[in-house]
Amino acid sequence: MATSRMQYSIASALLVIGAFLTGCSTASKPPQPGTPAFYWAAAREMYRAGDYVKTNDNLAQLTRSENDFTARARVWQVVISAGVAQAHMELADTYETGARANRNNPAPFRRETNVQRNAASTAALQFAEAFHNLQHSVKDETIALEFDFPRGNAAMPPELKKVTSGIVLPPAELALVAKAMVQRGVLLSTCRAVGAPEDPAKALELFKAGNPQVRTDAFRIHMASQLYDAAQLFAPTKLDQPQRTKMLLKEAMETTQSVPADKRTKELTGKIQGLLKKQKLTL
C-alpha cells in the first residue's frame, strides 16, 4: 500500500514537472514571422544593434495594421523615419558636391547621389504616412517615446571631407559612412522630438528615466518642421516631384494650423509659404 502511494506521488510529481516544463517551453517560444509581435521584436533587436534602416523597415511593416503594438510603434516610426530620410538627403547632397569636385570621374558620385536620394524618398514617404496616421490617432495631451536613446554622433563623419573633395571611397567605407550618417540622423531627429534640437546631452537627460513624455502639440510642430525639410528632397533640382513636395508641405501646414499659434508655428508657416512660392506651387 505504501509502495502504491509512493508510486502515485512520484507520478504526480512528474506530471507537475512536465506541465511546468511545457509551460516554460511555450512561454519562451519566439513570435512567428509575419506577426506584429515578430516585427516589434525585430525592430527592438535592430535598434539595439544600431541598424536604424532595418528598424524603420520593421516598424513600417508593423504599423500597416491595427494591433497591440501600433500606437507605440507609430510614434517610434515617425522619429526614426524622419531621421533616416534626413540622413540620406544629406549624404546625397555630399556626393553631389563630390561629383562637382571630381570632374574627371564624377560617375561614382552621381551614382551614389541617386542611390541616396531614392533611399531618402522611401523614408520620407514612410515618415509622411506614419505622421499622418499618428495625427488622427493620438488624442492625449502628451506622447510617450517608448524607446531608448539612440546611439550615434551629432558630428558629421570625418570621411565626408574626402567625398566633398572628390575622393572616391571604397565600398566598405561607403557602407560605414552611410550607417554613421543614419545614426546621426536618428539621433538629431530624437533630439528635435523632445524639444532639444542640436543638443544630444539635454535630450539624453530626458531619456535617463525612460520613456520621456512630450507635449503632443510640441511633438507635432517638431515633426512638421522635419516634414518641411523632407519636402525639399523633391525640388526641381533634386528628384523633381512637385506633387510629393505639395503632399509633405500640406501635411506640415495643416499641422501648424491645428495647434495653438506661437513663434514656432509662425516661423514654420512662413518657411512653408516661402518654399511654395519659390517652387511656384499652391496647396
Image (cartoon, rainbow, N blue to C red):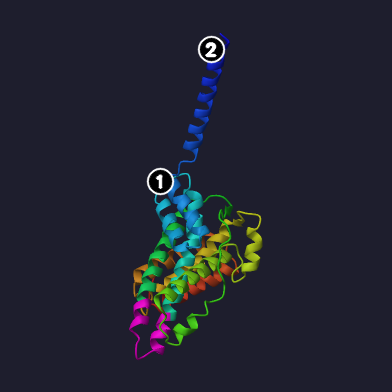
Q: Is residue 96 magenta?
A: yes
> Which amino acid is tagged 2?
Ser
Residue 150 colored in magenta in the image: no
- The magenta-colored residue range is 95-113
Up the image or down, 226 lies above or below 28; here it is below
Work out whether mark 1 precedes mark 2 in sequence or the reverse, and give the earlier one. 2
Please rate how many residues cluster around mark 1, counting C-alpha atoms within 10 Å: few if below 14, some from 14 to 19, many from 20.
Answer: few
Which residue is more in the foreground, 29 or 236?
29
Q: Secondary structure at mark 1?
A: loop
Q: Overall secondary structure of the magenta stretch?
A: helix
**Disc 2: which residue:** 4
Q: Kindly give the residue lying farthest to the front in the view shown.
A: 3
Whether residue 189 can be seen here: yes
Where disc 2 sits, the SS reads: helix
Q: Which residue is mark 1?
A: 35
Q: Residue at x 39, y 77 (%)?
A: 279
Q: Position of residue 33 (x, y in %)?
A: 39, 47
Amino acid type, callout 1: Thr
